[in-house]
Image (spheres, helix red, strand yellow):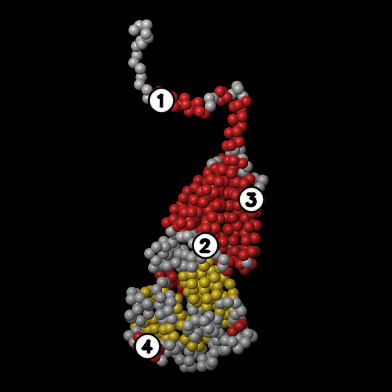
Amino acid sequence: IGKKKKVSSFFCNAGLLELSLGKFRNVLLNQTNPEEAVIRNIASNVTVVIFQVHAQQISLSPSNPSVNSSGTGVDKGLVSILRPQQSVCTWYLRSLVASQVLSTAISIPYMEKDPIPGGCNLEFDLEVDPNIYLDYTLVDIHIKFAPANLGYTRGANPPSCDSGTGQNSRWRLRYDVYRYFLPENDLSEMVLMSHIQKMSEVQSIKANGIKMLTLTTDDKTNVYFSSLPGQGVIYNIIVWDPLWNTSAAYIPVHTYACSFADLVDNCSSLSKLSTKVFFTALAVLGLFTCFFGHRFWKTDLVFMGFIFTAFFFFVFITRVTGLGYDLRLTLTAVAGIIGGLFLVASWWRSGSVLLCMFVIGLVLGFLFSSTVFFTPLGDYRVFRDDVVFWVTFSSVALMIPVLFVGCPRILNILASGIVGSYAVILAIACYVYTSLAYITLDLLRRVLNDYFSRAYTNVPFQTNDFIILSVWTMLALSGVTVQLRRERSEVPFPPHPYLTWKRERERRSTNVLDPSHHIPPLRERIHNKLLHIKECFQKEQPAGERTPLLL
């Protein structure tokens, strides 16, 4: 009772905000002047009204003093169970900061046969809690919610949540989880306010959202998704009663998987400087390899060896050490360079291209397999099992070097064109958001995080992604075409330098008619060159006879 009086006295100077059921109202809120939201003339067949308010980044605090309930969050809602003859509902709104905060509010009515979202809450603070609770990291997003209850008439007691598991209990309810992507590279408040309206009511959620999965009452009420820092996402859940074929929506929740308040690495500048330097340098080498990789064979080997070594070294050093990101990336770059030079050295010494082509084929195979699992195929439930996923992934990756074992030149040109152009896309992703970066990033997340397999990994594909996909396709096709036309009359691979040097040395030592046979040894040639240089600095002798006879 004391808390109830305190809430009422706090809002005694509130402004008045008239609302209509099912219609959004944008409102500016602050901490000192709360708003009183009122809905009048509620129909008698309405049994429940769910009030919700949303802001982009500043937490809001709606409350209902009549039932002593309140909450705090950027996406928050309250349930009002109507009494007999009740036709007016009142809520109070305020933000947690003194400055003006743009928000949007709506009240949605439900009838007696509609399920009540959060009606069987046993975990969270509110008695009836229709909110979705969201946590995020740089890797995944976790949403959880309270189970719903069956609807009932005004003045009746709510159905028991634990009376049984039959068709007459809440256990018959089904939960459809939906996701909606905001426009890419747009962090404005007004965009969020307009799009969150599309995810608040049942029919608009079905029309605009992407249905991710369906949960039964036997399933846990939590779901994981891959994190997309900088990309706005809205989640909501529709609870469906199959007996009455009625539905109700929870409170939509949004996230950008990043912080607006951080001074460094905030939502507007996510990529670190070290990441930009690393991938920009890789893109320059990749662009060169895309068009000239087969002609400059050793440069191609350095590029492919760098990628192969850097990937596995980064996984290893992240798994076994606690080093900072910048240091890990620096060590990865050093290890990648060593790996690329080692691949060149192994070819120079052995003369065989088999090992080199196997590494190059694996790099292309890993990219191809990652692209396959980047599609909706990757979200199939069977691939949540790590054994099934890695066996399938490895089989697809190994298929590439096996298919091209008889035509290594074609394999190398394809790999240099496709992988080299994708390095350019990764560099673009450091400056402009694109979902194409998650082709390889999701693979890295799955390697580094034991529980990433439970996350749904589909990503938005919008205008920006189509443009960058066109750039990737154009670069890859151009690079492959140029190399195929230029190399069609050339030998499949450049001659091996070590074996060429040995054959040339043997030829010179046995063929006396070869002018090169009479070339002096290296030491003598260096000595003669030094003498020639020394003569250039000697003072010129004066002209005239200097013989002893004339003197």
Bin the neighbour count of mark 4 within 10 Å (Cα to Cα): few under 14, some 14-19, many 20 and up: few
Who comes first in sequence, dot 1 or dot 2?
A: 2
Q: Compute the Cα span from label 1 to label 2.
A: 70 Å
* On-image quarter of the C terminus: top left
**Regarding mark 1 in the picture, which secondary structure is present there?**
helix
Bin the neighbour count of mark 3 within 10 Å (Cα to Cα): few under 14, some 14-19, many 20 and up: many
Q: Compute the Cα span from label 2 to label 4.
A: 49 Å
Q: Nearer the viewer, residue 362 or 536?
A: 536
Label tally: 4
Residue at which label 1 appears = 534
Is 47 left, or right, of 379 in this rendering? left
Q: Amino acid at mark 1?
A: Lys
Q: Amino acid at mark 2?
A: Phe
Residue at which label 2 appears = 461
Q: Amino acid at mark 4?
A: Lys
| Percent coordinates x, y for residue 524 in the rendering | 50, 26
Who comes first in sequence, dot 1 or dot 4?
A: 4
Residue at which label 3 appears = 401
Q: Nearer the viewer, mark 2 or mark 3?
A: 3
Q: Is 137 placed above or below 114 here?
A: above
Who comes first in sequence, dot 3 or dot 1?
A: 3
Circles 1 and 2 in contact, beta carbons < 8 Å:
no
| Percent coordinates x, y for residue 10 in the rendering | 35, 86
Residue at (52, 76) in percent of width and height: 144
Residue at which label 4 appears = 6
